[in-house]
Image (spheres, grey):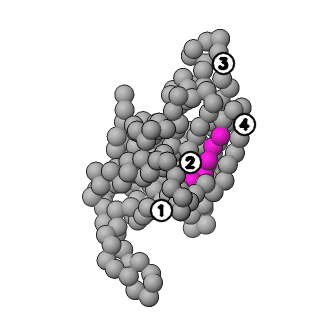
Amino acid sequence: MVKWLEQLRRWIKRLFRQPQKRSSYPRIIKRWDRNNTAVLRIERNTPGEVATYRITSLYGSYDFLLTLDYLPELHAELVGEFDGTTIRLGRFDHPSNPATHRFAVWCVWHNGYSRPIGIWDCDLQGYARSALREIAPKRAVFGVALRALQVIHSTKTPAMSWQSQMERMDWLGLLEERIRGELSSPNHNLKSAVVLRQT
């Protein structure tokens, strides 16, 4: 867990570093805009990466970063390469945990400083058919990221500012709601395990 956390922190710092002339990384894959807020789908070159979204707004003093990683690949040990294909052997520190993915939400400042809001290991596949098992987690975290576009900023009440509403967002609850819809299973339980939670 510590190794993964440190790799993600380094990646976040690189994300906000001044761009160099030759580097085009990280690459923005797609962008959605609404209500002075933007959601960016970002490419992240790390083992197990499923989806990465950066949420930014004119009203925010910092951005939010959502990452989703596939645990078997994240925890896999690199064995080597064969005919250009990377070979990894899976391992789990807690084999009794049914978690399939690691979902993390971060606060990130433009100077590269970052702070995790929460990191959870959860089951985003359940007993779904094989096609849904691949697509459902990506679509669910995409829906969670787009939820930020519905937040309306109000200057009249501090509690209704964009930043305040985003800080109170129930990220894990939104993910559970979305994955239930994607898996067409209204009783799906995330069986989430808290890896790190900021209070």
Q: Earlier in the sequence, mark 2 or mark 1?
A: 1
Residue behind mark 4: 34
The answer to which of marks 3 and 2 sits earlier in the sequence is 2
In the image, is residue 42 part of the stretch drawn in magenta?
Answer: yes
Q: How many neighbours does mark 1 have within 10 angstroms: few (below 14), some (14-19), or many (20 or more)? A: few
Q: Between disc 1 and disc 4, whose residue precedes?
A: 4
What residue is shown with label 1? 45
The residue under the point 51% across, 33% down is: 62
Identity, as a three-letter code, of the amino acid under mark 3: Ser
What amino acid does circle 2 point to?
A: Tyr
Residues in magenta, as a range: 38-43
The residue lying furthest to the right in this view is: 34
Indicate which disc, 3 or 1, sits on the residue closer to the N terminus.
1
Q: In front here: 132 or 59?
A: 59
Q: Pointer 3: what residue?
A: 154
Crowd band around label 2 with a 10 angstrom C-alpha radius: few (<14), some (14–19), many (20+): many
- N-terminal of the pair, mark 2 or mark 4, is 4
Label 4: element kind? strand
Q: Nearer the viewer, residue 96 or 134?
A: 134
Amino acid type of the residue tagged 4 in the rendering: Arg
Which of the 4 image quadrants contains residue 177? Answer: top right
Q: Which mark is residue 53?
A: 2
- How far apart are the alpha carbons under marks 1 and 4? 28 Å
Q: What is the spatial separation of the Cα atoms under label 2 and label 4, in whole angstroms? A: 15 Å
Residue 181 in the image: above or below residue 96: above
- Residue extending farthest front: 21
- Quarter of the rendering containing residue 166: top right
Q: Is residue 51 visible?
A: no
Measured in 3D between alpha carbons, the distance from the residue under mark 4 to the one under mark 3, in whole angstroms, is 15 Å
Q: Which residue sits at x=36%, y=36%?
A: 197
